[in-house]
Image (cartoon, coloured by chain):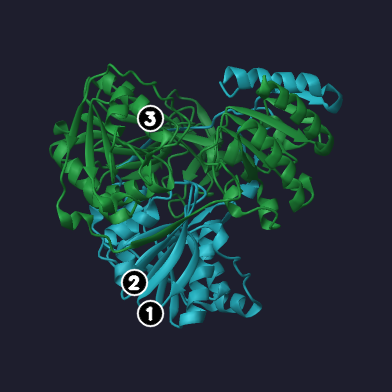
Chain colours: A green, B cyan
Amino acid sequence: MGIGVIKNKCTGCGICFKICQYGAIEMIEESHTLENGKEVGRLAVIDLGKCTLCNECIKPCPTNAIELKAETHKFEGKENYKDVMVFAEQRRDELEGAAFELVGKGRELADKLEVNLYALLLGKNPKDKPEKLIASGVDKVIVVSDDSLFNFLPEPYTNILIDIIKKYKPSIFLAPSTTQGRALLSRTAATIYTGLTADCTGLDVDSDGNLLQTRPAFGGSIKARILTPNMRPQMATVRPKVFKPLGEDPDRKGEVIEEKVAADLLKSTTTFEKWIKDTTSAISIDDADIIISGGRGLGCSDNFKILFELAEILGGAVGASRPTVDEGWIPYSHQVGQTGKTVGPKLYMAVGISGAIQHLEGMRSSDFIVAINKDPEAPIFKVADVGIIGDLFEVIPVLKEKLKRAVNV
Amino acid sequence: MKIIVCIKQVPDPEHAKMDEKSGTVVREGVELMVNPFDLYAVEEGLRLKEKMGGEVVVISMGPPQAEKALREVIGMGVDKGILLTSRDFAGADTWATSYTLAKACEKVGEYDLIICGKQAIDGDTAQVGPGIAAQLGIPQMTFVRKIDEISEDKIKAERLVEDGYEVISSPLPLLLTVVKEINEPRLPTLRGRLNAKKAIITKWGPEDINAEKDKIGMNGSPTMVDEIYTPDLSKNGKIFTSDQLGEAAEEIIKKQKEMGLI
């Protein structure tokens, strides 16, 4: 394992120096000869005391002069892991939309690999949900039912998942990157020693059956492609609202497998006491297709009312920038950005938000961005598909009427 | 009560801005800071210590320069800082990081509570907290926004979920990850700063925590970064003024229809 600069390839261009976020690369004056015989006077040197082996400098080097080597693990019986399995996530025994999105993507991957697509359904009462999953593209639904599985608790869910993985040996296991999906897969991957990639926005497979996992990092300012080359299953959480469900075909055939699990797997150290519904808005920003977010431009807490009205008309949720939450104008659960939530709805409307980098990094993966701001120089306009320069208190009422008419047609 | 808090030093996003031409995020100089979510974890640890007595031990894994992050939280009132630093730790993914931190927690020993921030703002994975809990075989409570009750041997807390919050109770020891809503972190005091300057930071390598060599750092990581690229996200969108609201609205409505939102 190690990182180093290949001296006769480094032209001293300094690109790596600019990229390194840890200040681990220094440019020194040192004349040396390149492979092609050319003499150059500058050389990149990596300070191993600062380098975190984050990998960011490797690809951008125009002459491939930085080398990173790791020894890889052997995993016994890798070839026995074949199928694709998705976690059909539920909240209080209701299937989540994200489950069908994963089925859509999982179907595509399973077809490419020519393997089965499984769904794992944990809950109290499966009712007609296995059939729905089959109609949506699943080949085999594994059902584990118990009254105690009505609410998510990390330990029993993890125990069951590990049991199922051992028995069915999927090559790929996907769950939504929700609070539940992240808690469950982190605990599982840590226990069985396999790779887990968080919050993927792109998934594909190569000819060797490797899952190519693309995910944003640093709040979306960079994207990374991650592989789990040796361990199985290759686990990933997937950002909701990115992939599309296939739609139901009632004629699709599939199999429902009821699995009984040993009673001690259902034991939990933690106890679920109760769930309190968020009553500040009908739709949470995690689930919304449309988010109307307010910033400091609103001026005070009361003015969020304007946004809630607009959100109700459009069927969206209300988001907020960090300063408004810090001022106490709106609860933290609405905060979009690096210290709040990362969202990617179809339509994001930023009202009176200037667009600090922390905010942009929490919403710039939205499909369509509308920005309304007085200041024509506001950075938010850079990421906007539609920008409106103007006073929000004049713009929003007019816009509201026009959009209302369109919705009601 | 012995409380361990795990923190990470991350690049400061305030020193990043969007490059107007390329639309990519560029960083100006190198500024590192304590991951903001970890400050809530440190603050919660300090508040619990004030209430229950005991000590707060902070652990960080990173290059030698991460010592600065530990000094910063010692300034807030933390009793002890431990830096896990070695070339062999470098390049760790979330699995190897969880393993290493769990080994360090075992070495510290006799903890009642381990607190982490909900995620680090560089990777945004939220995987290391639950990973540590799994490695140690203790229960976890993620995205905690409030501790309702705590005693020497049990805890009741609220965790933030997509559609509200859940109240969970558990015996100790337990690992918590916390969200911003839980508290307002204190600033270092003058006296704290002096303590921070004088404090001796314990440094542990793989042998000190009995870590297996093939489970740490890049070699121990099941995942590998295949490629990193900087997406261009500048949109060159249409800009309207307040006397063109009709056209702006039409543009939005057209798109809403296209996306099936109307």
Q: Chain of mark 1?
A: B
How many other residues sit within 10 Å of disc 3, few (<14), some (14-19) or many (≥20)? many
From the image, tell me which residue sits under label 2: B172
Name the foreground residue: B29 vs A37: B29
Give the Cα distance between marks 2 and 1. 8 Å
| Chain identity of mark 3 | A
- Mark 2 and mark 1 on one chain: yes
Position of A351 relative to B129 (above/below): above
Q: CA distance from mark 3 to mark 1?
A: 44 Å
* Relative height, residue B57 to residue A99 (above, below): below
Residue wearing tag 3: A100
- Name the amino acid type tagged 1: Glu
- For label 3, the SS is helix
Q: Can residue A124 be seen?
A: yes
Is there CB contact under 8 Å for labels 2 and 1? Answer: yes
Q: Is residue B88 visible?
A: no
Q: Nearer the viewer, residue B1 or B100?
A: B1
* Amino acid at dot 3: Phe
- Residue A344, image x, y percentages: 54, 34
Question: What residue sits right under mark 1 in the picture?
Answer: B152
Q: Is residue A291 left or right of residue A184?
A: right
> Where does the C terminus of chain B fall, quadrant-wise?
top right
Distance CA(mark 3)–CA(mark 2): 37 Å
